[in-house]
Amino acid sequence: MDILNPAFDYDKYGHEYSGYRRTDPRIAEYVHRALGDAKTVLNVGAGAGSYEPADRYVVAVEPSRVMREQRLARGKAPAVIGRADSLPFDDQAFDASMAMVTVHHWPDIRRGLAELRRVTRDTAVVMTFDPAAMEGIWLAHYFPELIEIERIRMPALDFIAEALGGDCEIVPVPIPFDCIDGFQEAFYGRPEAFLVKEVRAAQSAWGFLPEGGGERSWSNGWPTTFAPANGTGGSRLTARRLFIPAR
């Protein structure tokens, strides 16, 4: 499968995004801890503003008009119109920077990460998914083509670390069973949520399936095989989010 442009068209499809993609406070603890004592933070590919710390001075960069409008609706500061591969800031302009589940949208990931490193004095925090671990999630059983899209778009962790300069630490972040941030892996305990079109629309990979691919779906069988009986996830039910902090 070839994907010529990995960027999702949020101006066309992202109008309900912020209703389903929200900051999960347990994941946010990892983000804020990784930012250390930074007082100024740049958020690149900021979307509607999830995971931005409220106790720091945050400057957000976001190319999508619809996402910028949703920031304002959430009470966030307006975002600078811009792209990761051409950040309009001086070298080392910010104490820290963050890129939250966004690098797979960047047409030139290496250049975007180099820009992130350039404008950051200390820690650059990237939150992403490990493409090498995606076969282990239950959704791969029902939508292997969806997982293949994600594996194509998601850069390898070693690539991200090298592009940031190499001095990196990879920190696994567990996904809570009742995670309120509506990315795909968050629904391992609530698979019925994928029957809701708006849930799928808040997850960009569905937009790369052939037309109607997101609707055909569960006719192949309801995913009870992987559903937990006692409210706790087993090894097949847990995915990992990963931080890559670089100094």
Image (cartoon, grey):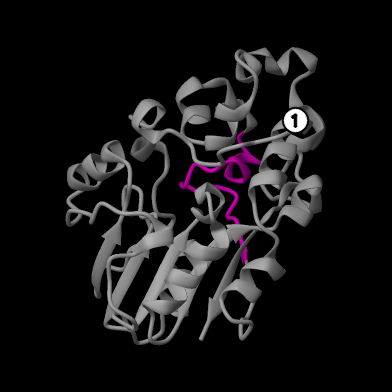
Q: Quadrant of residue 120?
A: bottom left
On the image, the x and y values in percent for residue 184 come to 59, 40
On the image, the x and y values in percent for residue 85 come to 43, 60
**3 in relation to 89, above or below:** above
User: Crowdedness of circle 1 by 10 Å Cα count: few (<14), some, many (20+)?
Assistant: some
**39 in relation to 179, above or below:** below
Which quadrant does the N terminus fall into?
top right
Evaluate whether residue 27 shows in this view.
yes
Q: State left or right for residue 17 relative to residue 58.
A: right
Q: Residue at x 39, y 73 (%)?
A: 97
Front one among 9 and 238: 9
Give yes or no for residue 180 being in the magenta stretch: yes
Q: Quadrant of residue 176?
A: bottom right
**201 in relation to 180, above or below:** above
**103 in relation to 135, above or below:** below
Q: State left or right for residue 128 relative to residue 18.
A: right
Evaluate whether residue 171 shows in this view.
no
Front one among 150 and 217: 150
Give yes or no for residue 34 being in the magenta stretch: no
Front one among 127 and 137: 127
Q: Secondary structure at mark 1?
A: helix
The kind of residue on which mark 1 rests is Glu
Main secondary-structure element of the magenta-colored stretch: loop
Q: Residue at x 30, y 57 (%)?
A: 61
On the image, the x and y values in percent for residue 6 come to 56, 41
Q: Where does label 1 land, which residue?
A: 145
Count the numbered circles shown: 1
Q: Residue at x 53, y 36 (%)?
A: 204
Q: Which residues are magenta?
A: 173-190
